[in-house]
């Protein structure tokens, strides 16, 4: 059985794809997997590390304004469609799965036009443009959140939840503390602005870390994103903090072992990408969410508000984030054990730990049904 999987640009599209692949491989030991992504996205680094065959397609999304750059991107899009048709023809997939990002569009469209069953996996409350278009051609759509099913044709839409890496559930608090040199008995805050980082969160965290250096009751693991790491370290030094003297404060550019970090977290400060939220939910980690304000259709705020309405998170809009605001929110949550426990329980109720298995079964099911 040949299976094409496509999704790219950010970890929020890549890690769900990898998790679905693992679930499929457990069911179909002989499955041949081909991953199609962009040459410059994180998938070009992450997917080959997993031992999965990878083919890049050069493609970029359109700017939301009239520009000469869009002419270049339109030409690249036409070339990408031609390239996708060639890939589908050469690989002869039995099913194609898209987890989002611009690169999934040409591949799933080419597969559908070739008569190959296709599955769209939508992670967010509000579906992106690519997936809304692909849904017209798709054989099935798997959505991560209940509200998202209203966007798609009901007869082929399934609420599966968002796939999470198995390690998210198996990692222990002790594993996490050992991996980062922390004390498992102390309260721990995990801060991440997503795979590419978030400047507004990083800047606010400088003040939080400066004050945290004066006490050792709470440990902080702050993931800045690679591009922001140097600037964030410089700002922390300018604030008078020498991180090497404070082992309870860790500031890193990127994590390949995020499951271990989540396992030891008592509170998370995150953007509101669907994959991160799904993993926090599976672990039952209460969160302070700062949605990325420029996400398509403002879908991150919609994600965050859904989690907030469930009683599992507190939302601070990006325009309101500051060191003082973040420190106040963290201080209130860390000091109130009962509130934190209630939020953790609410977050856990949102979790769907078997989502990957359900999506794998759905993909293989449409393959056999349509084949």
Image (tube, rainbow, N blue to C red):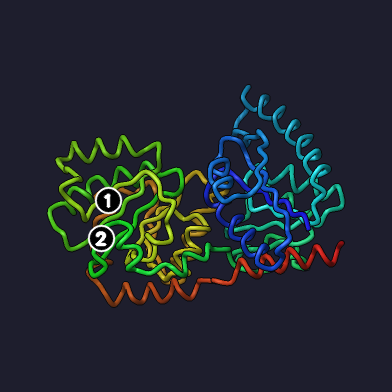
Query: Can I make out residue 133 in this image?
Result: yes
Which residue corresponds to the image point at 25% horizontal and 60% vertical from the top-left? 182
In this rendered view, identify the residue nearer to me: 111 or 303: 111
Quadrant placement of the C terminus: bottom right
> In the structure shown, which secondary structural element does the residue marked by tag 1 occupy?
strand
Q: Is residue 286 above or below residue 196?
A: below
Quadrant placement of the N terminus: bottom right
Q: Residue furthest top?
A: 68
Disc 1 and disc 2 in contact, CB within 8 angstroms = yes
Percent x, y for residue 71? 68, 25
Which residue corresponds to the image point at 44% horizontal and 64% vertical from the top-left? 280
Percent x, y for residue 9? 57, 43
Q: Which mark is residue 250?
A: 1
Q: Is residue 50 left or right of residue 135?
A: left
Specify the quadrant of the image occupied by residue 127.
Answer: bottom right
**Dot 1, how many residues are within 10 Å of its Cα: few (below 14), some (14-19), or many (20+)?**
some
Specify the quadrant of the image occupied by residue 172.
Answer: bottom left
Percent x, y for residue 282? 48, 69
Q: Is residue 53 left or right of residue 43?
A: right
Which residue corresponds to the image point at 58% horizontal and 72% vertical from the top-left? 354
Q: Which label's residue is closer to the chain start, 1 or 2?
A: 2
> In the structure shown, which secondary structural element does the residue marked by tag 2 occupy?
loop
Q: Is residue 269 above or below residue 101?
A: below
Q: Determine the CA span between mark 1 and mark 2.
A: 9 Å
Provide the residue designation for mark 2. Answer: 182
**Looking at the image, is mark 1 or mark 2 nearer the viewer?**
2
Which residue corresponds to the image point at 62% horizontal and 35% vertical from the top-left? 60
Query: Can I make out residue 129 in this image?
Result: no
**Dot 2, how many residues are within 10 Å of its Cα: few (below 14), some (14-19), or many (20+)?**
many
Q: Which mark is residue 115?
A: none
């Amino acid at each position: 059985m040949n299976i094409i999987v496509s999704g790219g640009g950010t970890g929020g599209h890549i890690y769900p794809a990898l998790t679905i692949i693992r679930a499929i491989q457990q069911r179909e030991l002989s499955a041949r997997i081909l991953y199609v992504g962009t040459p410059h996205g994180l998938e070009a680094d992450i997917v080959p590390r997993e031992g999965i065959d990878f083919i890049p397609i050069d493609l970029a999304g359109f700017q939301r304004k009239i520009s000469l750059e869009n002419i270049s991107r339109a030409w690249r899009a036409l070339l990408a469609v031609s390239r996708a048709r060639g890939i589908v023809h050469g690989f002869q997939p039995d099913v194609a799965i898209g987890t989002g990002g611009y690169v999934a569009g040409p591949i799933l469209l080419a597969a559908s036009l070739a008569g190959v069953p296709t599955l769209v996996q939508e992670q967010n409350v509000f579906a992106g443009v690519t997936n809304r278009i692909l849904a017209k051609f798709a054989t099935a759509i798997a959505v991560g959140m209940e509200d998202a099913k209203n966007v798609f044709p009901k007869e082929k839409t399934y609420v599966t939840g968002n796939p999470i890496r198995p390690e998210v559930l198996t990692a222990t608090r002790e594993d996490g503390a050992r991996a980062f040199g922390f004390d498992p008995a102390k309260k721990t805050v995990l801060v991440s602005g997503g795979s590419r980082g978030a400047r507004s969160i990083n800047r606010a965290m400088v003040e939080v870390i400066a004050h945290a250096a004066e006490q050792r009751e709470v440990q902080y693991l702050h993931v800045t994103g690679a591009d922001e790491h140097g600037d964030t370290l410089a700002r922390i030094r300018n604030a008078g903090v020498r991180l090497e003297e404070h082992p309870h404060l860790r500031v890193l550019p990127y994590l390949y072992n995020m499951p271990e970090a989540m396992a030891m977290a008592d509170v998370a400060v995150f953007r509101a990408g669907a994959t991160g939220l799904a993993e926090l939910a599976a672990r039952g980690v209460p969160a302070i969410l700062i949605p990325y304000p420029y996400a398509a259709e403002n879908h991150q705020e919609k994600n965050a508000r859904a989690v907030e309405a469930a009683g599992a998170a507190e939302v601070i809009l990006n325009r309101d984030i500051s060191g003082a605001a973040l420190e106040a929110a963290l201080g209130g949550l860390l000091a109130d054990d009962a509130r934190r426990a209630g939020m953790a329980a609410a977050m856990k109720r949102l979790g769907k730990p078997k989502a990957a298995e359900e999506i794998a079964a759905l993909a293989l099911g449409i393959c056999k049904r349509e084949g």
